[in-house]
Amino acid sequence: MADPKKKVMFCPLMSVGTNVDMVCIEDRCAWFLPSVKKCAVYMNAYNALLDVTEKQKRR
């Protein structure tokens, strides 16, 4: 699995269903957002997590 101490990003799409984490190809990927230097899939998941967390706090 990914080592959190290293700043290597892994592709969530290419890593699905494998036992090996695939390294992000960054600028060569259509899902990469250069403005935030993150994957669009990661950003969608992160935003969904923030949304769920906010909704749980309201309860």
Image: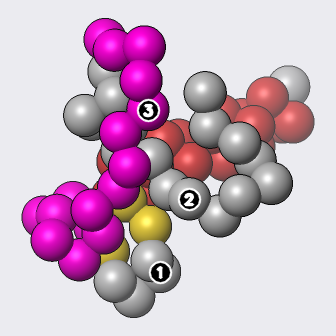
Element at badge 1? loop
Which residue, given by chain and number where applicable, does mark 3 sit on? 21
Vertically, is 38 above or below 46? below
Residue name at image x 56 percent, y 48 percent: 46
Q: Give the colour scheme of this rendering.
A: secondary structure
**Residue 49, image quadrant:** top right
Q: Quadrant of the N terminus?
A: top right
Question: For the magenta stretch, what is the residue range?
Answer: 17-32
Question: Residue 2, image x and y in percent?
Answer: 62, 37
Mainly helix, strand or loop, the magenta region? Answer: loop
Vertically, is 56 above or below 38? above
Which residue, given by chain and number where applicable, does mark 2 sit on? 8
- The answer to whether the residue labelled 2 contacts the one labelled 3, judged by CB atoms less than 8 Å apart, is no
Residue 51 appears in the picture as rendered: no
Element at badge 3? loop
N-terminal of the pair, mark 2 or mark 3, is 2
Residue name at image x 75 percent, y 47 percent: 4
Mark in front: 1 vs 2: 2
Which amino acid does the dot numbered 1 rest on?
Val
Label 1 packing within 10 angstroms: few (<14), some (14-19), many (20+) = few
Q: Is residue 9 magenta?
A: no
Which residue, given by chain and number where applicable, does mark 1 sit on? 36
